[in-house]
Each structure stands twice: as structure tokens, then as C-alpha cells.
Amino acid sequence: MQKSVLILSDGRKGHLNQSIALAKYLNYDYEIITVRFKSKLHKLLSYLFDKVGLYTLSILESMTIVKKYNLVIGAGSSTYYATKTISKELKAKSVTMMLPSGYRYDFDTIFAQSHDNPPKKPNIVEIPANFSYIEPTGIYKAQKKSIGIVIGGSNKILTMNLELIKAQLDFIVANFKDYEIAITTSPRTPQEIEELIKGYNFDYEVIYSTNPVNPIPDFLHECELVFITSDSTSMISEAISYGNSSVIVLPLKSSKENKFTKFIDQLQDDGYLHIFNGIIKHNNRKIDFSHLARKVIL
């Protein structure tokens, strides 16, 4: 009988994709339900209930679970209590895709990113980046040797500056004259950056606000080099998990060391990528997530 996974979603795509990736590497069928606490107070109560070993669905909004599952997977703080509670109800194994801060680490398997400094425990699998599963779709096909550029946007820690992005793009254009250049923006890319990009007349261009498709898997499949801005751990994780492309991170401005800089610094030290500093360096080591997936305690 085909094994199956119940994936709990907090509504954040970056979290959900990690759980889906694990299910795909395990070759399990999966279903997704969204979980929410009834209120912020109920979420606060979940931390207390977890500490004393009390698990109840009564603090969560109602949901429908249609069958029995072998695994329950959660990613994101709004899913961890539900992951434990539902897995106990179903007598299934519990898995989290990130270190579940604030909750006891007694899940069956915890995948924890190295930059979170996870403790050494038998049920904690330390991973260098977020779980990613890449499937090219044929949106982009290179006509000759090519490079890809992936532009994100500002977040709470990193700032996307027009002058900085322009300088980085100017460098790329000047140093890759013999290459086809493909570029995509993301849902968070500022309009002024999109307008800047339009002025370059790149060989292939996706402006996400007007054409919401994702050519990144095809960039990784087709391109010799892929440049990615440093604001998204998800996009960087994808780039270092598939294909043969060398990965170069375009750093954004930040006022102090943070989880993003720590994340990419460690990946550079381990040979997965190069942080752009005016020099092109071909780092293309890839993470074997299929091997890591087999560390799930079943």
C-alpha cells in the first residue's frame, strides 16, 4: 500500500514547499491542509500546553482529516503544535522542516538548518539549506550558452537598492557579452527595479508582476551560471540543490550580520556558492536532498 503524508500548511509558500519536497523525495502521496490557531492567545497557550504534554485540537480552527497517514509534516511556528497533536491522534510519525523554536524537540524527526545552530540530538538532522525539489518545466530554453539572473526584493533585514542592483547588472552585462542572459523578478521585487530591468532588453525576461511564472528551475537546468540576490533562503536553496550551474549570490545592503548573511557565508565556505565581490568564481557543489530525506525516522 502506498504510504502517505499529511502536510500542514501555515499559508506561507516557502514553508509549504519544503514539506512538499520531502514528500516527493520519499515518493509518498501527500495531501495538504491549512492549520490555524483560533487566536493569538491560543497560539501562546500551545507553548504552555506543549511544555506540560497537553495536546488538544480545541485550540485550533476546525479542520477535516479524511484518512490515516504515515507521516505528519509541518513547517512554520503555526504548524508545530498541530503536527504533534495530529500525529498523536493518527499514531503517525511527526516531522518538522525547521527547528521548532519554543516547542520541545520531541518530534520523531526535525530537519534543522545549520545557521540555526541546532543541538546535537538523534532525531535532529542538520541540513545546510531548506529542502527543495526542482522540476524544470520548459518555460525557458537557452539558444546558446547562457546565464540566469534571479532578482528578489527587500525584506525586514536586507534592503534592495536601485544603484546597487544597477551596478551589479552592469557588471554582468559587461562581462558576459557572448552569453544569452535570462532574468526573472519575484513577487517581492520593487517596481523601480522592474523598470530598471526592462531597460536592459535582456534576451529572456520575466517581470513577475505582469507575468507570474517561475522559470528558476529552467535557469538551473539550462544556465552555466545563475546569479541570485541574497534576500531569499528558498531561492538560494533551490539553486544549490539541482543542476550543474555555478551559483553567485548578489549581496544586498544590511546594517549588521544576520541570518541571511550567516546562511550564505556558510554555504560559500562549504563550496556551494560564491558571494559576488567583483570577481566571478565557479562554485557549484550541490546538496543531495534525496539522501537527507532517507534520514526520516519511519
Image: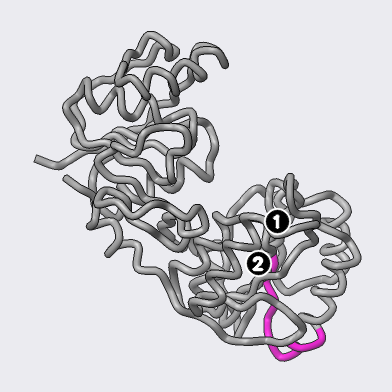
- Quadrant of res 269: bottom right
Q: Position of residue 201 (x, y in %)?
A: 82, 71
Quadrant containing the C terminus in the rendered view: top left
Q: Per the image, is 39 magenta? A: no
In-image side of 76 versus 276 (left or right) = left
Mark 2–mark 1 Cα distance, whole angstroms, equals 8 Å
* Residue bounds of the magenta highlight: 174-183
| SS state under label 2 | strand
Where does label 1 land, which residue?
Answer: 152
Which residue is located at x 43 percent, y 46 percent? 98
- Quadrant of res 66: top left
Is label 2 in contact with label 1 (beta carbons under 8 Å)? yes
Which residue is located at x 57 percent, y 67 percent? 140
| SS state under label 1 | loop
Q: Total of numbered circles in the picture?
A: 2
Tag 1: amino acid: Gly
State the residue lying farthest toward the bottom. 178
State the residue lying farthest toward the top. 58
Q: Position of residue 290 (x, y in %)?
A: 29, 62
Tag 2: amino acid: Ile
Q: Residues within 10 Å of mark 1 (few under 14, many from 20)?
A: many
Where does label 2 land, which residue?
Answer: 228
Which residue is located at x 68 percent, y 81 percent? 180
Vertical comparison of 286 with 259: above or below: below
Lower sequence index among marks 2 and 1: 1
In-image side of 184 versus 33 (left or right) = right
Q: Per the image, is 175 magenta? A: yes
Q: Nearer the viewer, residue 28 or 279?
A: 279
Quadrant containing the N terminus in the rendered view: top left
Vertical comparison of 279 with 229: above or below: below
Vertical comparison of 180 with 30: above or below: below
